[in-house]
């Protein structure tokens, strides 16, 4: 039963990622925490999200902006070890609180489309990259700071998606180097791979039918629900 639930979570997250260009970790991590524990959820999210970003970037790498990506990725490299260390120091209920809180706050900020002057230019890229790197290795969720940076930089969706995918490839590679690979059985890896493939097919099909704003709102609503659920489980564990 756990394998079926795991596959369902990965399928939903993969579908969301292909539908909107981001969101696997936002949607999947809160549920994965309940199935695999906080550390297991983070490393699996890093792995799956990284693979999806690699595949997605294959068709859009020419639109990557090196001027923004270099400071974003260098800053992330500096903070990933701190996030990885944190996941191994805190008790599970506290980790659930931290991760649920990070997801919830990040989603609320993205929903508001927060305008922060400090997130503009090179300094903004460094700040967003640093926070994203820490969140990615600690909670598996590194996308929201990059979304906020893109909003404040005035990027269009067409500009955002390949750059977010490039950042996802790099920061998830850093996070996996710090946290290690997921410890799954061969059968469970098979479930995960199949779910990723099916999610990609469904996500691409839905992307042609669902308006972008509606899809993004759905993703953020699911993520907010998951974050609040993780918060509740953390409070209950305490």
Image: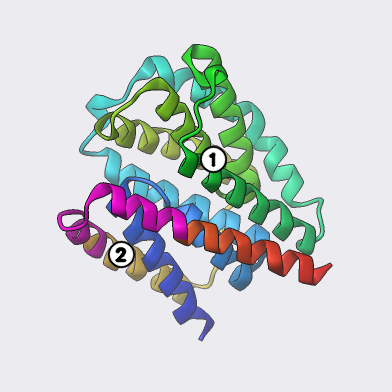
Q: Is residue 55 left or right of residue 72?
A: left
Answer above or below: position of 46 versus 112.
Answer: below
> Label 1 neighbourhood size at 10 Å, few (<14), some (14-19), many (20+)?
some
Residue at x 52% of width, y 34% of height: 145
Answer above or below: position of 142 versus 16.
Answer: above
What residue occupies the far left of the structure in this picture? 208
Q: Secondary structure under badge 2?
A: helix
Residue at x 44% of width, y 35% of height: 147
Answer above or below: position of 126 versus 151.
Answer: above
Viewer-closest of 112 and 43: 112
Q: Secondary structure under badge 1?
A: helix
Location of residue 97 (image quadrant): bottom right
Location of residue 109 (image quadrant): top right
Give coordinates of residue 155: x percent, y percent. 33, 26
Q: What kind of secondary structure does the magenta stretch mostly adopt?
A: helix
**Contact between labelled residues 1 and 2, with CB atoms less than 8 Å apart:** no
Query: Quadrant of the image for the C terminus?
Result: bottom right
Residue occupied by mark 1: 109
Asked if residue 143 can be seen in this view, the reply is no
Location of residue 29 (image quadrant): bottom right
Viewer-closest of 188 and 1: 1
> Residue 216 colored magenta?
yes
Instruction: Specify start and end residues of the magenta stretch as a single range.
Output: 202-221
Give coordinates of residue 100: x percent, y percent. 65, 56
> Label 2 neighbourhood size at 10 Å, few (<14), some (14-19), many (20+)?
many
Viewer-closest of 27 and 214: 214
The dot on residue 199 is 2
Viewer-closest of 187 and 134: 134
Which colouring convention does the figure follow? Answer: rainbow
What residue occupies the far front of the structure in this picture? 112
Residue at x 41% of width, y 68% of height: 192
């Amino acid at each position: 039963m756990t394998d079926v639930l795991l596959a369902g979570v990965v399928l939903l997250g993969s579908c969301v990622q292909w539908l909107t260009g981001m969101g696997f970790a936002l949607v999947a991590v809160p549920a994965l925490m309940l199935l695999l524990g906080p550390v297991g959820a983070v490393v699996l999210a890093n792995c799956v999200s990284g693979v999806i970003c690699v595949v997605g970037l294959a068709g859009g790498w020419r639109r990557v902006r090196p001027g923004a990506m270099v400071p974003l990725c260098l800053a992330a490299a500096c903070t990933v070890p701190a996030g990885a260390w944190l996941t191994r120091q805190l008790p599970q209920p506290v980790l659930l609180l931290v991760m649920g809180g990070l997801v919830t706050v990040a989603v609320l900020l993205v929903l508001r489309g927060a305008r922060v002057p400090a997130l503009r230019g090179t300094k903004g890229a460094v700040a967003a990259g640093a926070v994203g790197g820490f969140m990615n290795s600690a909670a598996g969720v590194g996308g929201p700071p990059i979304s906020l940076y893109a909003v404040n930089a005035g990027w269009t969706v067409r500009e955002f998606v390949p750059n977010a995918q490039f950042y996802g490839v790099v920061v998830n590679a850093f996070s996996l180097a710090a946290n290690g690979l997921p410890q799954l059985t061969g059968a469970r890896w098979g479930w995960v791979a199949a779910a990723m493939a099916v999610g990609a097919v469904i996500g691409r099909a839905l992307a042609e039918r669902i308006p972008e704003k509606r899809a993004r709102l759905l993703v953020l609503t699911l993520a907010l629900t998951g974050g609040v659920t993780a918060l509740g489980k953390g409070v209950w564990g305490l």
